[in-house]
Amino acid sequence: MINNHTHEPQTEIIPINSMIGLEKSTIFFHAPQANKLPWGFVEGKVANHVEGYPVIIQIFKNNHAVHFAQTDIGDDGIYEYKFRVLNSDKGHTTKIFEGDYSVKIFKVVYLNQENLI
């Protein structure tokens, strides 16, 4: 647990039509002040993804959008998106992310009776 967050995603399914829906997951991300690693990443596996739809990733700090991205889902349902947390150029380091963020992840999935809200 970091800053009273468990890192467990909050997920909901929003039906688009009778066959597919938008799965929205929200998770906490913390970039500590003493961070020395240059990369952060979002990864996961979608068991019932609809082919042709990428994963959309939105990162917010204090409810303000700071980064948007999309990444494809592999045939095995796995996706990964890497992003810079630190940038270093000629000995000068810039912190791109520092502090607490919420990350929203959107995936288009096939609906079944178990995942309807």
Image (cartoon, helix red, strand yellow):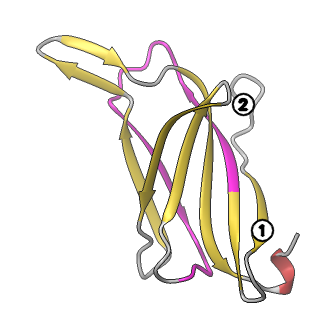
Residue 90: x %, y % from top left? 11, 14
- Judging depth in this view, the residue of 9 and 23 nearest the camera is 23
**For the residue marked with disc 1, what is the amino acid?**
Ile
Give yes or no for residue 26 being in the magenta stretch.
yes
Residue 5: x %, y % from top left? 74, 32
SS category of the residue bearing label 1: strand
In this picture, residue 74 sits left or right of residue 25 = left
Q: Are marks 1 and 2 in contact (CB under 8 Å)?
A: no
Q: Specify the quadrant that holds the C terminus.
A: bottom right
SS category of the residue bearing label 2: loop
**For the residue marked with disc 2, what is the amino acid?**
Met
**Residue 65 sits in which quadrant?**
top right
Residue 39: x %, y % from top left? 36, 36
Residue 70: x %, y % from top left? 44, 57
Which residue is label 1 attached to? 14
Q: Residue furthest bottom?
A: 19
Vertical order, 33 against 16 (above or below):
above
Residue drawn at (86%, 85%), measured in percent from left and top? 113
Residue drawn at (69%, 41%), measured in percent from left and top? 7
Vertical order, 74 against 79 (above or below):
below
- Judging depth in this view, the residue of 35 and 84 nearest the camera is 84
Q: Specify the quadrant that holds the N terminus.
A: top right
Q: In this picture, which residue range is highlighted in magenta?
A: 25-50
> Distance of mark 1 from mark 2, alpha carbons?
28 Å
Which residue is label 2 attached to? 1
- Judging depth in this view, the residue of 98 and 3 nearest the camera is 98
Q: So how many labels did they put on this image?
A: 2
Give yes or no for residue 62 being in the magenta stretch.
no
Mark number, residue 47: none
How packed mark 2 is, by other alpha carbons closer than 10 Å (few <14, some 14-19, many 20 or more), is few
